[in-house]
Image (cartoon, rainbow, N blue to C red):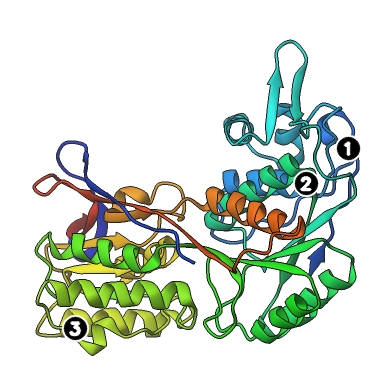
Amino acid sequence: MKEREGQEAALGGPPVAAGATADTGTRRGGTAAGVPGAGPPGGGSAAAPSARRPGTSLFQWVKQSLLDSIARGEFDPGEPFITQRGIVERFGVSTTTAVRALNDLVAEGMVVRRRGIGTFVRERPAGRPAAGRTVSYICPEDEGVHHSRLLSGLAAETRDLGYTLSIAHTVDTADEPGVLRQAAESGTSGVVFFPRDRSEASSTVEELRRAGLSVVLVDRYFPDVPTDAVLFDDFAVGHAVTDGVVGRGHEAPVVLWSESDVTTVRDRHNGYLRALRDRGLVSHPDRSALVGYVDLPPGERRARLLSFLDSSLGLTALICGNAVTLALAVDDLLSLDRDLPQTVELASMDDAGPVGLSPLSVVSASLPAASMGREAIRRLHARIQGATDPLDHVVLPAKVTTRSTGRNALGIVRATASAS
């Protein structure tokens, strides 16, 4: 018998109940064009679904592909929507996944079930803008949970207001100005824009605004250019999550980021620093640096974790800037050929990660991405209709949940296994 040391995720004791919650937020002052059209019953001739990206669950891939099809106008409200069986055949997924995707679309108001008839894309209310008016959504090519929820809100509100939604993806920061100008030249009525990390498109946005095109930013904003924007209260998120972790007895938590040069991350980072100061704790430069983690080579990521483990402060808690970073950090921790402390507790500043990861976070923030999409379209519609009130940043509240102290929780723990 040979013993080996490793790490694994382990769950012990009774189920964890949600503990304290905090609401945050205040209000402060490749392309794919969508065209109206009808798909046949069951969506037989709808465009083939895009390839599933690594790390995307089957459910999220199916749901977002269906949202994309609705946004492009592939399903007419007067014709039956794709059926459960059609989803199974089109995507090669289980009945359970197909049912879950349809149920989510019904719950979000994208489709409606008519007893004895079938499922249909929701009708546009009467008295809305004339058919043929288009608004554009320009965003990074990303099929993650956050973008899926945001798109569902955008698609629902554009349909309610009688617009067609055109979706255009940017492949990198150099691509953004050209995609923005292409949207303007297409005759779109307005643009909702999700800038990339290190975006340099602020001057292009200002150029389009001066030319009379309405633009609303989502998730992040340009500090140097005044625009309408719909945001989360990221400072409050960073503060509340960090305070929750410190409140569990961790005086030197490490923070990891997916991006480093975007207002979302900078605001969360400032909230993290402020929470440490409010608790009278020192901000250690190596643990609080605003440095990207996700794009590092695997060896460099694990070397960073090992440096924390080997330091005099040790590693007892990791705060991740988002759930994608959390997922990667968990994988890296499990891959280390090194003993861990008894427990490393994990926290995330959003909940938009792979299905099943949420129990890993002892503190986490829930962000209303679908509401962000709806609010952005409402703001854009008001501008298109001629609203002249001052440019506005609408800041949406997030709910931060801290698991009750003293209860068992899923975490990364040291484990010893035997192999014969």
Q: Picture quarter containing residue 7? A: bottom left
Mark 2 closeness class: few <14, some 14–19, many ≥20 residues within 10 Å: some
Residue visible at 14% across and 85% down in the picture: 311
Q: Name the residue under label 1.
A: 39
**What is the secondary structure assignment of the residue under circle 3?**
loop
Residue visible at 52% across and 53% down in the picture: 369
What kind of residue is marked 2?
A: Ser
Q: Name the residue under label 2.
A: 69
Q: In whole angstroms, how far apart are the C-alphas of marks 3 and 2?
A: 47 Å
The picture places residue 357, in percent across and down from the top left corner, at 38, 51
The quarter in which the C terminus is drawn is: bottom left
**Is residue 127 shown above or below 409?**
above
* Observer-nearest of 319 and 85: 319
* Observer-nearest of 345 and 267: 267
The picture places residue 372, in percent across and down from the top left corner, at 55, 54
Q: Mark 3 points at which residue?
A: 283
Q: In whole angstroms, how far apart are the C-alphas of marks 2 and 1?
A: 9 Å
What kind of residue is marked 1?
A: Gly
Mark 1 closeness class: few <14, some 14–19, many ≥20 residues within 10 Å: many
